[in-house]
Structure formats: structure tokens, C-alpha cells
Amino acid sequence: MTAIPMDRIAEPFIQRRATQHLERGRVVIFVAGTGNPYCTTDYASALRANEVGADIILKATKVDGIYDKDPVKHKDAKRYKKVSFAEAISKRLGVMDAEAFSLCEANRIPILVFSMNQKESVRSAIKGENIGTLVS
């Protein structure tokens, strides 16, 4: 199998170019990290969202929101519909690391956590439908 060079699939992150795409009404999807050691992909998401002035972070995960405990291990886990940044950090609701939550809180960037496994979930999130958990 022949590898496809990354530059044929996506652009590297350049803040000015990402902002231009957004100004033109295009959808910009950020993937991967920053390439810096000890910087998580969660933090990279928060950092990039802040750099381009994003209105919200859409975080697609294996579960359909944020729970009070791991829903895979605990059948009685309860899903939050909405949670504050302070609560997410203090209760250690492990969907993102505390540094990412803190950066989003400081810059007033809400996070919508929803399932990547449900059909049409990204479309539903973009349309503002009531899915997942909103952290704000």
C-alpha cells in the first residue's frame, strides 16, 4: 500500500489561513496535537479554538456525553445535559483534561461532548439540536 502525503489530504495549521477559511464560511476541522511534548490533544483543541475565535468546540467521543462515572463500567451512570467548567474540573469528569477545560473557561468557549458512533451526530451538533453534554 502506498502512503498518501499529508499535504495532499489537509493543510498544516496556520492561524491566518484557518481564520480566512472561517471568514469565507468554510468548515475547519482541527485534528492531532500541537507537536509539543506534554501538550495533550484536548489542550491543542482548546488552544486552536481560542486562536481562531471559535464559538464552540464539538468533541465527538465514544459515549454520548459526560457522565458522573464511566458508563461502560457502571450501568447506573447518569449523563449530564449541562455542566459548568468549574464542576467538570472539581468532579474530575474525565472527558477532557483540566488544562483544556481551564483554557476554554478563561476564553468563554463552550464544549459540546457527543457520541461519534451515532448516525448524523455531527450534523445534529452543528444544527444545535439537543444532544450530548454542554460544558459552559
Image (cartoon, rainbow, N blue to C red):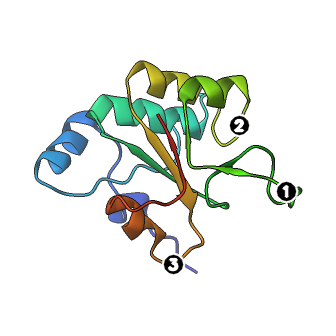
Foreground disc of the pair 3, 1 = 1
> How many numbered discs, if any?
3
Q: Which residue is mark 1?
A: 76
Q: Quadrant of the N terminus?
A: bottom right
Under mark 2, the amino acid is Leu
Q: Is residue 49 left or right of residue 62?
A: left
- Secondary structure under tag 1 reads loop
Tell me which numbered mark, 2 or 1, is placed earlier along the sequence.
1
Under mark 1, the amino acid is Asp
Q: Is residue 125 left or right of residue 88?
A: left
Find the residue positioned furthest to the top. Answer: 106
- Secondary structure under tag 2 reads loop
Quadrant hosting residue 88 = top right
Q: Is residue 108 left or right of residue 27?
A: right
x and y percentages locating residue 31 in the rendered image = 47, 51
Q: Which residue is mark 3?
A: 119
Tell me which numbered mark, 3 or 1, is placed earlier along the sequence.
1
Image height check: is 30 above or below 124?
above
- Secondary structure under tag 3 reads loop
Callout 3 touching callout 2 (CB < 8 Å): no
Image height check: is 106 above or below 16?
above
Q: Which residue is mark 2?
A: 93
